Image (tube, rainbow, N blue to C red):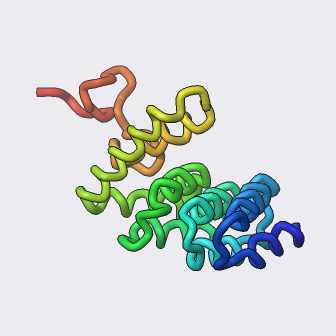
Amino acid sequence: IPALISDLRTARGLIGPSWSRRVGAARQLGELRAPQAIPHLIAAVESSANDEVKRACADALGQIGGEEATGALARWLVDPARDDVRLVCLLALTRIGDTPARAALMRVNASSSGRAESIDRLQTELERANGDSARRDVITQALTILVSGDASGDNGADPDHAGDGQRPGEDLD
């Protein structure tokens, strides 16, 4: 893990082939769920000029989870200057799925333009995720949250009235 963190940090700000080393390090740190890498991954997102490095680091934060990772992802999700990682943040927060992550996803719903843009991006990404069932599942879950407006991913509809939007205990007139 220290060697991967070193790869992530020592290549900071460099261009050319070093960005691929940083992407690889970020992906491995995410797969290892290395919490000690969180500050370095955050720093890489905030300082890198390479969008692929930023996305790999944000994705790794989603794999690792935790309060610090969730906080950074939540900030970037609503930051207009962070368009480069917004989709990855949506998916990472969906993957984390804890209460703070769901609350961050609900903040997207507070802005109808942000919600509509996020839904469009997720639908496009869903089309691209052909054979990757795990990615399709996360995208579908994020879409469910944004479309239903319910961070639990369950819109509260009564399964006996599927499709009519009726909640349990409501009568249709």
Please give left or right for residue 173 compared with residue 35 in the image.
left
Quadrant position of residue 78? bottom left
Q: Which quadrant is home to the N terminus? A: bottom right
The residue at the far left in this view is 173
Q: Position of residue 36 (x, y in %)?
A: 79, 73
Q: Position of residue 42 (x, y in %)?
A: 63, 74
The answer, for residue 92, to whether it is visible in the render is yes
The answer, for residue 64, to whether it is visible in the render is no
Which residue is nearer to you in this view: 99 or 41?
A: 41
Q: Which quadrant is home to the C terminus? A: top left
The residue at the far front in this view is 16
Please give left or right for residue 151 compared with residue 41 in the image.
left
> Image point 88% across, 72% down: which residue?
2
Q: Is residue 50 above or below residue 106?
A: below
> Image point 73% across, 75% down: which residue?
11
Q: Is residue 167 above or below residue 59?
A: above
Q: Is residue 144 above or below residue 54?
A: above
> Image point 63% across, 58% down: which residue?
56
Quadrant position of residue 111? bottom left
Q: Position of residue 80 (x, y in %)?
A: 36, 71
Which residue is nearer to you in this view: 12 or 145?
A: 12
Count how many numbered circles sit on residues in the image. Answer: 0
> Image point 80% across, 64% down: which residue?
34
Q: Position of residue 152 (x, y in %)?
A: 47, 47
Which residue is nearer to you in this view: 23 or 154?
A: 23
Q: Is residue 159 above or below residue 84?
A: above
